[in-house]
Image: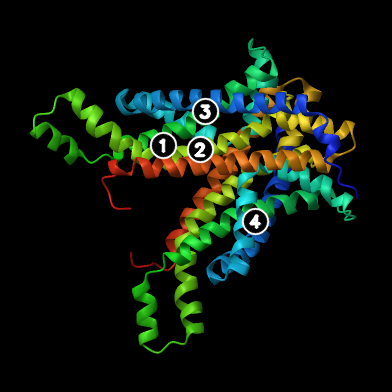
């Protein structure tokens, strides 16, 4: 296998990383909304959020992607397939991230909240300066984990015709008759990306302000 | 837009067959993955440092790469090393090996988490080695590995859908084909989503039930 082929795979992996990062960020925004709904304690908000989370965690991502990809044109929304893919990945990761965030907020030590109230912080200040930073700190490792899962899951958007790393590997394997080398190389690139994400995640985690356990 | 579910229902023999293949792959793949994973965990625990390092590297590769790439490697790469498999066996091997990597980690943490004091206490009151394994080690370990195992069983259920890409005749492939023949993609895929949703929820519910029933073996307050 030539260097040229490996370069093509590397170029395609930029697509993989871009789609994953965009999906994680959009998913995080939706997750904040969902976890807010879950924590509101009002069944009007809690129930829809629970159903959303249960659906997107209970149905395979591939099925979600196929459904969104085929459903959008039918209901009159014509978007490029890459947008459909990002919508699918974002909704799926939002469901998982919402659960993480809910767990994070639930794990904020009560004593810290009470002492903040004691020294006269307003509820708004308690939320912004105590609850949010601690919950984010607690859920950060799970977020890094989720990023790695989405990087791997993004291989599935190849089925809707987006030429990211997996689709490029498929095309090259077909045209060069070197499937072993090509797919092994693609696997190696995924492994490298995930290793870098884990490494960067660990470094950032060490710099985040600590939380008493 | 017309949503005509009858078009899909009319194809029920093919759907039942596809669902059967999905469930078969799921159950066989899960059992194989759990057994291989258990053996890997035992080998890593008692096989010496070299075995531990080698298996650790394999687990890292299997957990760090997408399942789809692994399947492509087996199905399209296999024939180049004399492993010419039909889609179904290739898919079964793929899902078993993929699942085994995760199960081995689950079992490994299970082995390591049973407190030494419990085993020593068993020895102190004069239990035999066999009694210690059956009455202390295994029950305590079961409680530890049950929740992540149920999680893994659910994940493997969902991964079966990916096998449609290498044309395993499971439910996703079946319903996609029906959807394109009948121009009823949304209907077919909705049935598919519903099938997985119900099955996954049911599995999670059964897992919770098992956890409650076995909670008398729980030795920690969590």
Per the image, the residue denoted by label 2 is: B152
Q: CA distance from mark 3 to mark 1?
A: 14 Å
Badge 4 crowding class, 10 Å Cα cut-off, few under 14, some 14 to 19, many 20 or more, is some
Q: Are marks 1 and 2 in contact (CB under 8 Å)?
A: yes
Task: State the separation of the CA atoms marked 2 and 4.
Answer: 21 Å
Q: Secondary structure at mark 1?
A: helix
Q: Position of residue A40 (x, y in %)?
A: 55, 71
In this picture, is B166 found above or below A124?
Answer: above
- Image quadrant of residue B130? top left
**Please, is residue B76 above or below residue A96 in the view?**
above
* Circle nearer the N terminus (2, 3): 3
Q: Residue at x 87, y 34 (%)?
A: B180
Q: Measure the C-alpha gap from mark 1 to mark 2.
A: 9 Å
* 10 Å crowding of disc 1: few (<14), some (14-19), many (20+): many
Q: Which residue is mark 1?
A: B106
Residue bearing the label numbered 4: A52
Chain letter, disc 3 residue: B
Residue bearing the label numbered 3 = B30
Q: CA distance from mark 3 to mark 4?
A: 27 Å
Badge 1 or badge 2: first in the primary sequence:
1
Callout 2 and callout 4 share a chain: no
């Amino acid at each position: 296998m030539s260097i040229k082929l490996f370069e093509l795979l590397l170029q395609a992996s930029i697509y993989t990383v871009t789609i994953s990062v965009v999906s994680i960020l959009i998913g995080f925004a939706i997750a904040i909304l969902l976890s807010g709904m879950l924590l509101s304690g009002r069944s009007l908000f809690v129930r829809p959020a629970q159903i959303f989370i249960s659906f997107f965690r209970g149905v395979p991502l591939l099925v979600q992607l196929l459904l969104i990809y085929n459903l959008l044109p039918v209901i009159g929304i014509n978007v490029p397939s890459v947008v459909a893919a990002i919508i699918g990945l974002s909704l799926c990761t939002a469901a998982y991230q919402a659960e993480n965030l809910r767990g994070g907020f639930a794990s904020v030590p009560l004593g810290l909240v009470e002492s903040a109230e004691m020294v006269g912080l307003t509820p708004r200040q308690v939320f912004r300066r105590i609850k949010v930073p601690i919950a984010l700190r607690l859920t950060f490792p799970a977020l890094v984990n989720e990023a790695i899962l989405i990087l791997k899951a993004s291989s599935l958007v190849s089925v809707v015709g987006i030429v990211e790393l997996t689709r490029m590997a498929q095309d090259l394997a077909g045209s060069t008759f070197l499937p072993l080398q090509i797919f092994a190389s693609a696997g190696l690139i995924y492994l490298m990306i995930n290793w870098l994400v884990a490494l960067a995640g660990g470094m950032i985690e060490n710099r985040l302000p600590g939380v008493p356990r | 837009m017309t949503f005509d579910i009858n078009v899909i229902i009319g194809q029920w023999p093919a759907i039942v067959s596809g669902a059967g293949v999905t469930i078969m792959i799921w159950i066989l793949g899960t059992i194989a993955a759990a057994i291989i994973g258990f053996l890997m965990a035992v080998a890593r625990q008692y096989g010496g440092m070299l075995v531990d390092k080698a298996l650790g590297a394999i687990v890292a590769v299997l957990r760090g790469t997408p399942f789809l790439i692994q399947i492509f490697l087996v199905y399209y790469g296999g024939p180049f090393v004399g492993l010419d498999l039909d889609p179904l066996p290739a898919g079964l091997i793929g899902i078993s090996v993929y699942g085994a990597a995760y199960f081995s980690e689950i079992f490994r943490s299970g082995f390591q988490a049973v407190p030494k004091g419990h085993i020593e206490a068993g020895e102190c009151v004069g239990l035999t080695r066999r009694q210690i394994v059956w009455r202390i080690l295994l029950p305590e370990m079961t409680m530890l590995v049950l929740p992540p195992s149920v999680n893994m069983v659910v994940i493997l259920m969902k991964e079966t859908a990916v096998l449609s890409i290498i044309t395993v005749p499971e439910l996703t492939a079946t319903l996609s084909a029906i959807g394109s023949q009948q121009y009823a993609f949304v209907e077919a895929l909705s049935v598919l989503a519903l099938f997985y949703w119900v099955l996954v929820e049911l599995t999670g519910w059964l897992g919770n039930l098992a956890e409650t029933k076995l909670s008398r073996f729980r030795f920690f307050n969590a």
